[in-house]
Each structure stands twice: as C-alpha cells, then as structure tokens.
Image (tube, rainbow, N blue to C red):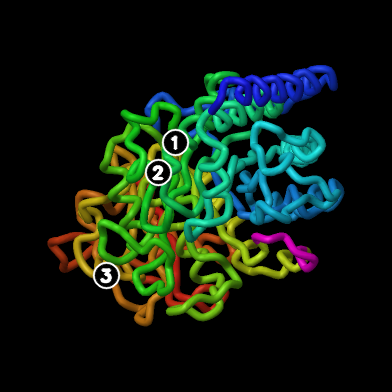
Amino acid sequence: MPKKNHMRNTNHVLLALLLVLCTGIFPVSGQNSRFPLKISANHRYFEDQAGKPFFWQAETPWLILQNLSPQDISTLIGIRVKQGFTVIQVMALPPDPQSGKNVNGNHPFLNLDISKPDTAYFGYLKKGIKIAEKQDVVVLMNTIWKGCCGGDWGKIIIQNGTERCRLYGRFLGTFFKDCPNLLWIQGGDNDPREQTDHYRQIALGILDINPSALQTYHASSGHSSTDMLPAVDHKWLNFNFTYTYFPEKQGVWLHETGFGILPEIYEMNHHEYQKQNDMPFVIGEAQYEGESSKGLDITSADVVRRQAWWAMLSGACGHAYGSWNWKVGPDWRKVEQDSGAWQMRWVKSFFEKVPWYNLIPDTEGKIIVSEAGKYGSDEYLVAASTADHSLIVIYCPPTSTPTSEFTVGSNYINKTAVIRWFDPTTGTFSKAKISFSGNQKGIRILPPGKNASGSTDWVLLIEKK
C-alpha cells in the first residue's frame, strides 16, 4: 500500500477514535461488577470478577443488534434470560457487505473501507451491548463474518489488506473499551485459509487496546478454533469454539473433517478435551431448533436438548442453543413458543445445583460398563464425574428402547449413594430404580421410561456419601 494512502487511512481512524473520546464513552461507574469474565486458574472455564464460575449458555440472535429497536432488543434479551440464557452470539456487521445496514439505515463503513467506520453504526451496536450488560448477559460478537461458502465479507477483508485490518481491530478495541460484557469472535462459519493473517491483525488490533480481551475463532462445521489456528502461532486466541451437527447431516459447507463425517457433539468435545490446549472451550454452534435440513426434519426440542446435555458432560464449559430466529425477523416474538428454548432453563438450574466446573468427562467409557450404546451414535450415554467420583452425572438421550437397563461400574457407586433421575423437560427429580444384587460388574440401573414431554431422555445424578 502506498505510504500516502496509508497515512490517509490512519488519520481517518485517528479522527474516528477522537470522536469516540469526545462523546464520553469511557465512564466506568455503573458497570456490572461481574464483568469482564476471566479464565479460571485451571483454564477449563470462565469466572466472573468475584471468582464465581460463569455458566455459559448462549443463544444465537446473530442480527439482533442490526434489526431491532433498543426496546425490542431489551425485550428479546429479557425473554432469553427467563429461558436461562447467559450469553448472546451476535454479528457486528450485516451479512451483505453491499446493501447491509441497520434499522436506522446506517452502513458500517464508507465504501467498504474497514479503516473508515461509521461511528453512528457502531454506536448503535454499543447501545445494544449495554442493554445486555444491564440484564447480566455476555455478548460474544463477531468482528467480520467470513461466510459459509467463501463469500460474504471474505473477499472484502482481502481487498482491505492486513494494515487496515489492524486499524479496524484497534478501532473496535477503543470504541467498545467500556463494554466489559463483550467478547470477540473472529471468522464465521468458515476456516481462515487465505484470510488467516487478516483475522490475526484484527485480533491483535483489539489486543493493542485491551490486552486481556477474550477472543475465539468460528471455523467451519466439524472444526474447532484450534484445529485451524494452533495456539502456539495465534496467542491472541484464548478460548476455543467447537462446531458440529451430527453424522447424517447433509449439504454441509466445507465438509472436510478429520473424522470423515461430522462427529456427534460429545465425540468432538472428547477430542477437544484431550488436546490439552490450556484453554476453555464451548460448543458454539450445532443444530438450530425450528430449522430443517437434509437428513433431519424440523429440529425438535429433543435434538437441542440432547446437544446441550451432551456438551456440558463432554468437557465443554458451555454451549450454544441455536434458534430459527437467528436473522431476528419480524416474527421474533414467536421464540416464546419454542419448547426447546424453555427447556434450556432446566439445563442451567441443574448445573447450578452441582459443581459442574469440576466435572471430568468420561472419555474412556469407564463409568458405564455395559449398555452405554454405540459410541458415535445419537443414543450413546455420556457421563462425567468429579475427580474423586463423589459426583457423577449421566445423560441418557432419547432412545427407541427406553426401558433398557445399563450398568454403572461398582467403583463409581455404592449402597449409600443418593441416586436420582432428573427430568430435563420439567426440572424435577425422582428416585432412581436400581439393583445391587447378582451383578459383579456393577449396579444395574433402569431408566424411568417416558419423561413428562413424552420423550425418553433422562439425567442421572449420583452423589456418593
């Protein structure tokens, strides 16, 4: 880039930053004292400023900050809070670079030059982020959505070059410096590839202003952040984002995985947990409730419920529930009718009753010694326990044989243990039916059959005394 143009772009960004400073956006009084989040000492989960483990349950209204008024942003976030959500995943930019704008008609950049941001556009994003902060909600925001199939903003990033990307990152870091509930996503539905250095510069630009910023990368389905960006080469990356659907999923973009086919959530997370990357990870995307795809009819509550429980018991410190409402269109209020969304509150309430942050996934299948189901199938029983096995949690997903017993190893259970079933559709506990006699391998456990919704999934809680 010629030096003259570089100076012009630099001066423009400096002017934008000066405008930010002059509008008084940096007051710290009144901020939510829980934020910013930080990574735990063992690098497995997030904590708030008081050191309390933060339960990460995300929702995906990707375009909420572009498409809704402040009042409606508050209303939608309020609905999600009632449903148990603590995080929203959003895009900073509209999906269409050419015609995209927010509800006020503002475009994010002048002539698609990312070193020339429109402070009115980004100011509206900030207003939404502040609304979320008041409701105790974290915002995980994508900087520039690369796109699912190689298009969208991917070409625009290359046209702008790495120097402007660094300037854009610095602008973001400065403009949103007073948003302690804000975390960052680079990428978006696609592996970094030819834009690797461009996203690196955006991330480093944010770090120039906020050295403690939490950032991740959203790769293509079947890939995690660290699959694509080794942490040793990308020190800005400090938490991991996993993304998969299910093996039968068809028509998936960039269907290039080391598994050959897309793995189940627990398979991908078990693999991620054993990497020992020294960073926490969340399941950032999976199947969305209310959406259809080849190989699956309209996604039911059963599917999104299964994904959430699998995620939390396979090593992740959080998960994202996906909604048909990701575009946040005119019918966004219908999310109040989605049973799967409401059942997420029971996920949250269950884990808030136990030290979930101490759970270790049973990646070797030692807890359930028989009838756990086929590994890699959607009927596999996923288990996790604390290091001393005083607490064990097992998720039994919906199955065609709900009355099939399974065996928990005798090392993990005894006659003094408190053993209960948890209905993931109502949030209620009941006593478990078990058999201690005539089995040398362990204790036989019989699932209750159908839960209150008519499905057959249950959560087993074993607390050894």
Magenta residues, start to end: 326-332
Task: List x then y, in percent, for residue 357.
Answer: 43, 38
Q: Nearer the viewer, residue 257 or 34?
A: 257
Mark found first going from the N terminus, 1 or 2? 2
- Splitting the image into 4 quarters, where does residue 169 fall? top right
Q: Which amino acid lies under the numbered mark 1 shown in the image of this protein?
A: Phe
Mark found first going from the N terminus, 3 or 2? 2
Mark nearer the viewer, 1 or 2: 2
Numbered badge on residue 239:
1
Label 3, label 1: how many angstroms apart (C-alpha)? Answer: 31 Å
Q: Looking at the image, is 54 positioned above or below residue 410?
A: above
Q: Which residue is mark 3?
A: 373
Label 3, label 2: how many angstroms apart (C-alpha)? Answer: 29 Å
Q: Looking at the image, is 460 positioned above or below residue 363?
A: below
Q: Nearer the viewer, residue 8 or 16?
A: 8
Image marks 3 and 2: residues in contact by CB distance under 8 Å: no
150 horizontally vs 118: left or right: left
Q: Which amino acid lies under the numbered mark 3 shown in the image of this protein?
A: Gly
Q: Secondary structure at mark 2?
A: helix
Q: Which residue is mark 2?
A: 225
Image marks 1 and 2: residues in contact by CB distance under 8 Å: yes
Q: Residue, x 82% and y 52% (percent of image)?
A: 103
Which quadrant would the C terminus be assigned to in this image? Answer: top left
Q: Looking at the image, is 154 positioned above or below residue 420?
A: above
Task: List x then y, in percent, for residue 235.
Answer: 40, 27
